[in-house]
Amino acid sequence: MQKEGLIERTVRSDRITYLLTPRGEDAAYVLLAFLRYGLRYYAASAEVARMKPLPSFQDLIREYYR
């Protein structure tokens, strides 16, 4: 993902962090859409059915920018 410009890696003496680039933020919408679609239409197990509802895209973005 770093090679494709989706994330940016920062190395410090005590930790390594990864942040989404603007290109990565755009790709996140697509990946989340695939995830939501798969969970909604192809996850037939009872465990998945008991999961709490999936958050909306707006909620996910709001959480990301908090």
Image (cartoon, grey):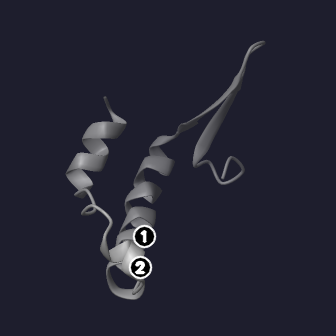
Residue type (three-letter) at the residue carrying disc 2:
Gly
Residue type (three-letter) at the residue carrying disc 1:
Leu
Percent of width and height locating residue 20: 51, 41
Which residue is denoted by mark 1 in the rendering?
35
Percent of width and height locating residue 16: 71, 26
Residue drawn at point x = 21 percent, y = 50 percent: 58
Percent of width and height locating residue 59: 23, 47
Q: Secondary structure under badge 1?
A: helix
41 lies left or right of 20: left
Which residue is denoted by mark 2 in the rendering?
38
Residue drawn at point x = 33 percent, y = 33 percent: 65
Percent of width and height locating residue 38: 41, 79
Q: In the figure, residue 4 lies in which quadrant?
A: bottom right
Report the front residue among 45 and 35: 45
Asked if the residues shown at circle 2 and circle 1 are in contact, with their CB atoms under 8 angstroms apart, the answer is yes
Q: How far apart are the two marked residues, 2 and 1, measured between alpha carbons?
A: 5 Å
Residue at far top of view:
13
Q: Secondary structure under badge 2?
A: helix
16 lies left or right of 19: right
Residue drawn at point x = 78 percent, y = 12 percent: 13
Q: Is residue 20 above or below residue 44?
A: above
38 lies left or right of 2: left
Q: Is residue 19 above or below residue 58?
A: above
